[in-house]
Image (cartoon, rainbow, N blue to C red):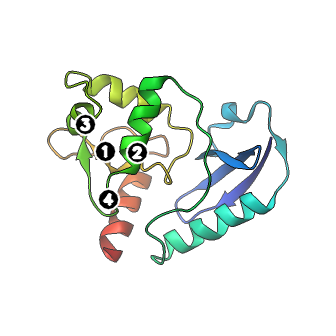
Amino acid sequence: MQFCQYDSPIAPLWLGEENGRLSLLVFSKDDSRLQGYVDGTTPLLEQAKKQLDEYFSGRRKQFEIPLVLHGTEFQQRVWRELQAIPYGQTHTYKEVAVRVECPKGSRAVGLANNRNPISIIIPCHRVVGQNGKLTGYAGGLDSKQHLLDLEQRYV
């Protein structure tokens, strides 16, 4: 498993690869997730960086990177549902909970978002509170707002 840093416009990010699939895209302040990874780059990590550059410049709305996700069955259902939220749109935690057939599970959806191992590509930034307000984000609310504004600019 290898990782490298990507200097995004919002903050430094760690990208990790496991067996030819992207397994990690987290804010670099969260270095606890790097356990087991070795510093270095790979063609897949370079491809991920290129696609992130395209995303941040408004030229990419969907990512085409193979992913490997480690989590509970529920977390994986939530992460798949997050990937179904269209570029430039938001859903509430409650809407996601209903879509994963756990209508009273807004809090559980929030916890699954918090454990999202592949930020941006699995767009947990597109999930907002019931009143439309921004709520927790691993990169901070400023980063979440930046990503939402970026997508609105290029819808």
Mark 2 vs mark 4: give the one in front.
4
Disc 4 and disc 1 in contact, CB within 8 angstroms? no
Q: CA distance from mark 1 to mark 3?
A: 13 Å
Label 1 element class = strand
Image location (x, y in percent) of residue 127: 31, 45
Q: Nearer the viewer, residue 96 or 131?
A: 96
**Is 94 placed left or right of 152 in the picture?**
left
For the point 50% across and 31% down, which residue is it?
115
Image location (x, y in percent) of residue 6: 68, 59
Label 2 element class = helix
Mark 2 vs mark 3: give the one in front.
3
Residue marked by disc 1:
127
Image location (x, y in percent) of residue 7: 65, 62
Residue marked by disc 4:
86
Residue marked by disc 2:
124
Tag of residue 65? none
Q: CA distance from mark 3 to mark 4?
A: 14 Å
Neighbourhood count class around disc 3 (C-alpha, 10 Å): few under 14, some 14–19, many 20 upward:
few
Neighbourhood count class around disc 2 (C-alpha, 10 Å): few under 14, some 14–19, many 20 upward:
many
Disc 2 and disc 1 in contact, CB within 8 angstroms? yes
Residue marked by disc 3:
99
Q: For the residue marked with disc 1, what is the amino acid?
A: Val
Image location (x, y in percent) of residue 20: 75, 50
Q: CA distance from mark 4 to mark 1?
A: 11 Å
Q: Earlier in the sequence, mark 2 or mark 4?
A: 4
**Is 66 placed left or right of 82 in the picture?**
right
Label 3 element class = helix
